[in-house]
Amino acid sequence: MSGKDAAKAKGPAQEQKKKGNYQKWHRRGQTEGKKKDPEAIPALKYGPSNNFMFFKEALSNAALKEYGALGKMIKQGEEYSEPQEPDIDDYDLDDDPYGINKAKYIEDLKDYRKEINELKKNSPKLYGLITQYLSEESLDEIKSQEKWEEIDEAADPVGLWQLVEETHKVNMISKVIAVMKLAARTTYNNTRQGGFESIIAY
């Protein structure tokens, strides 16, 4: 067989091999394309099997990235507080011959007003972000709370997050207690003396 004929004979086999490699890499590419985004925020589910802790972690990361200081509210919960206006009495302006304390007070006051303006601008955005990822069941439960209308009208993210925690953390705690009771019951059942066991073997 000539070199030319050998090349022709190898042609289909090589083509098949190339095709197989392409399909393998194509499938791998599709699989890699479907990988879960670690920063994706899951929709919050309602009920004993809710995903509140996963939701909170993902939402907190997104809120900190997008809205800075306001985003701390997700992790801090009830401990979160807005910036406090500088108290002029803390700057001892009566004993300030060179005006240094006064200048410091004015600078701190500017920083405070800047932070408050940022909070006012970002508050409705964070409110929208939270509501965007509430499942229909979660939103229905939150809407049934007494303060809902007032919070919704103000687009208040702090008030909304308090409602989210109040309506979903209870389910998480109940679930943990139920799991602990089940584990204790299982342990008890596993350690009971068998019908054919002697007291020494038990």
Image (tube, rainbow, N blue to C red):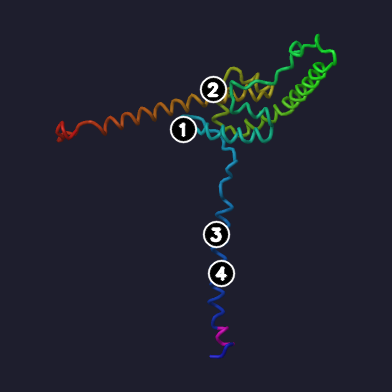
Pointer 3: residues within 10 angstroms few (<14), some, or many (20+)? few
In percent of width and height, residue 128 lies at: 67, 31
Q: Residue at x 55, y 59 (%)?
A: 27
Cα–Cα span, label 1 and label 3: 34 Å
Residue 8 falls in image quadrant: bottom right
Q: Residue at x 59, y 24 (%)?
A: 77
Q: Earlier in the sequence, mark 2 or mark 4?
A: 4
| Relative depth, front residue between 18 and 90 | 90
In percent of width and height, residue 95 lies at: 80, 10
Q: Is residue 156 left or right of residue 98?
A: left
Q: Earlier in the sequence, mark 3 or mark 4?
A: 4
Element assignment for label 2: helix
* 2 and 4 marks in contact (CB < 8 Å): no
* 1 and 3 marks in contact (CB < 8 Å): no
The amino acid at mark 1 is Ser
Element assignment for label 4: helix
Element assignment for label 3: helix
| Relative depth, front residue between 99 and 42 | 99
Highlighted range, magenta: 4-8
Q: Which residue is mark 1?
A: 49
Element assignment for label 1: loop
Q: Earlier in the sequence, mark 2 or mark 1?
A: 1
The amino acid at mark 3 is Arg
Residue closest to the far top? 94
Cα–Cα span, label 3 and label 2: 45 Å
In percent of width and height, residue 79 lies at: 59, 21
Q: Which residue is mark 3?
A: 27
Q: Which residue is mark 2?
A: 166
149 falls in the magenta region:
no
Which SS does the magenta portion mostly show? Answer: helix
